[in-house]
Amino acid sequence: MLYAQRLLDNLDARQHAIHLVLSNYAQAVIAEELPGGLRLPRGVTMHNLKSMNAPFASGSNAPDAMVVIPCSMGTVGRIAHGSSEDVLLRAADVVLKEKRKLILVPRETPLNLVHVKNFELLLLAGATCSGDRRCPPRCRGSRGVRNIV
């Protein structure tokens, strides 16, 4: 969640509509990696994971871009195979369908062949998969955010 916080800190909600959806596991990761919690800038709109009423869940109102950060390999696989059981997955499907920018920032390494094939499908569909060899602190035992981000 360190990278997600960094992204939120650098987006300007006065210039862009920023919508946030947290996965079921996000709260546990936030508690572990961001002891002070996730800081939301003024103007960010939160959406429930199971609410399909979010405006960006429809092709008629597709967002300009979507970032899934961090993105688990499970989420990579569900997006790659068109699963749309929640608003996060539906939005990713809409973004790909409408040929908008989908950026996935995976957090897990090493990759196995299934992961690589899922990334291949996503790249062919137009997604950007952006990784960083620096792992979040829980992966490497780092004590400081500045060492990671």
Image (cartoon, grey):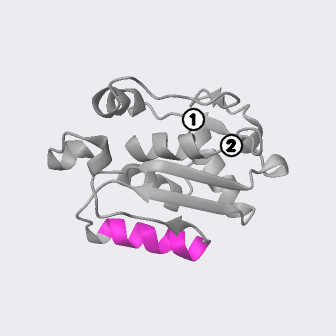
State the image coordinates of residue 134 (x, y, percent, origin top left).
28, 59
Q: Quadrant of residue 113?
A: bottom left
Locate residue 92, reporting x and y percent.
Answer: 61, 52
Is residue 81 visible in the rendered image? The answer is: no
Query: In the rendered image, which residue does mark 2 sit on?
Result: 12
Q: Identify the mark at residue 78; answer none if there is no mark.
A: none
Q: Is residue 31 above or below residue 17?
A: above
- Mark 2 vs mark 1, foreground winner is 2
Mark sitting earlier along the chain (2/1): 2
Circle 2 SS class: loop
Q: Is residue 115 magenta?
A: yes
Please state which amino acid type lies under the numbered disc 2: Asp
Q: Could you tell me which residue is drawn at 63 percent across and 52 percent down?
A: 66
Q: Residues within 10 Å of mark 2 (few under 14, many from 20)?
A: some
**Residue that extends furthest to the top in the rendered view of this protein:** 36
Give residue 42's quadrant in the image.
top right
CA distance separating discs 2 and 1:
17 Å
Assess whether mark 1 and mark 2 are in contact (beta carbons under 8 angstroms): no
* Amino acid type shown at disc 1: Val
**Which SS does the magenta portion mostly show?**
helix
Foreground pick, 128 / 81: 128
Membership of 33 in magenta stretch: no
Mark 1 crowd level (few <14, some 14–19, many ≥20, 10 Å Cα): some
Quarter holding residue 131: bottom left
Query: Can residue 71 be seen?
Result: yes
* Residue at image point 79% right, 52% down: 59
Q: Is residue 21 left or right of residue 78?
A: right
Q: Residue at x 14, y 44 (%)?
A: 141
Residue position marked by numbered label 1 in the rendering: 21
What segment is highlighted magenta in the picture?
A: 114-125
